[in-house]
Image (spheres, grey):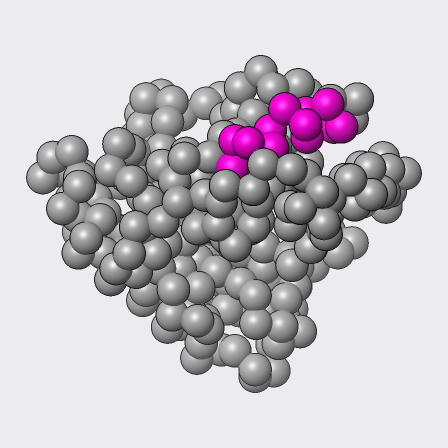
Amino acid sequence: MIEHCLQYCINSDMQDILTIGADAAVKAGSVLLKHYEKPHHVRYKGAIDLVTEADLAAESCILEVLHQKLPGAKVLSEESFSSYSTLPDKSVWIIDPLDGTTNFAHDFPWFSVSIAFYDAGKSLAGLIFNPVQNELFCATLDGGAWLNDRRINVSKVDLLQRALVATGFPYDIRERSDSILAMLKTVLTHSQGVRRPGAATLDLAYLACGRLDAFWEIGLKPWDTAAGYLLVEEAGGKLSNFKNTGFSPFVPELLASNGFLHDELVTLLQGFCTV
């Protein structure tokens, strides 16, 4: 599923990184499918922020692959290794073993495994695997973005009123509902439609392959965007904060688009800037 992407890797080291990441993502996806549509053990990290036994099993699977093939690899992962006080100054694997846990717990088939290799302030490789549809999205820096065996690109929609846009809601939405709903109303009334599927990683992957035209969200974590932002960039899209002054997966505010719609969306959302 990554053979074509491997051909465009900048060097053999990056080929190895991509191969290891893909192996971990697909194996973790298989773990999720084994737990899917079965009773779950749910633990709440917050009022609406939950974790299941599948999150932990998928994370364990990924860590086993990484540590077998790359002993001593540094990891930043949502479930067990989620603490960071400063930006990483060395290479690190940024992992979300199950993005869309709420969907998964309700047997709603929209969830993924996300793995990124991050070094020197940028993602060098990113993989997002949707096990239900058996779709592996992957990208390497300067190597393009791919879906299984085909190269992907963002859409060419250049009018927001003809665009399908996605968003997500932060876990503290109850404290920020007024601003969240105001943003939603603003974009909804200027676009063709807005979707809120519930997994930011797949929203970004769908943007990269042209199924969506733009995406925005606040309250994001590095494991939500570290793989997906590279996919979007390599597919020809654009990412920034709401003021259009740059993007980092360590900044919790994201506006992503096919590029053609970016200025129009910045005009609509810049008043809601949170960073």
With respect to residue 146, does 107 lie above or below? below
Q: Quadrant of residue 104?
A: bottom right
Residue 24, how many percent across, how many down? 30, 58
Which range is magenta?
257-269
All told, the count of numbered labels is 0
Instruction: Name the residue nearer the viewer: 52 or 202.
Output: 202
Would residue 188 be seen by someone viewing this image from the given angle? yes
Instruction: Name the residue nearer the viewer: 255 or 52.
Output: 255
Q: Residue at x 37, y 27 (%)?
A: 122
Residue reaching furthest to the bottom: 38
Q: Residue at x 58, y 59 (%)?
A: 100
* Location of the N terminus (image quadrant): bottom left
Is residue 27 on the magenta stretch? no
With respect to residue 89, does 140 lie above or below? below
Would residue 251 be seen by someone viewing this image from the given angle? no
Is residue 95 found left or right of 90 in the rendered image? Answer: right
Residue 108, how many percent across, how many down? 62, 72
Residue 58, how many percent across, how many down? 42, 63
Is residue 14 found left or right of 232 in the rendered image? Answer: left
Q: Residue at x 21, y 44 (%)?
A: 17
Q: Residue at x 26, y 32 (%)?
A: 142
Residue 246, how many percent across, how many down? 53, 19
Residue reaching furthest to the right: 178
Is residue 266 on the magenta stretch? yes
Is residue 271 found left or right of 121 in the rendered image? Answer: right
Residue reaching furthest to the left: 12
* Location of the C terminus (image quadrant): top right
Magenta portion: prevailing SS class = helix
Is residue 26 found left or right of 209 in the rendered image? Answer: left
With respect to residue 136, does 242 lie above or below? above
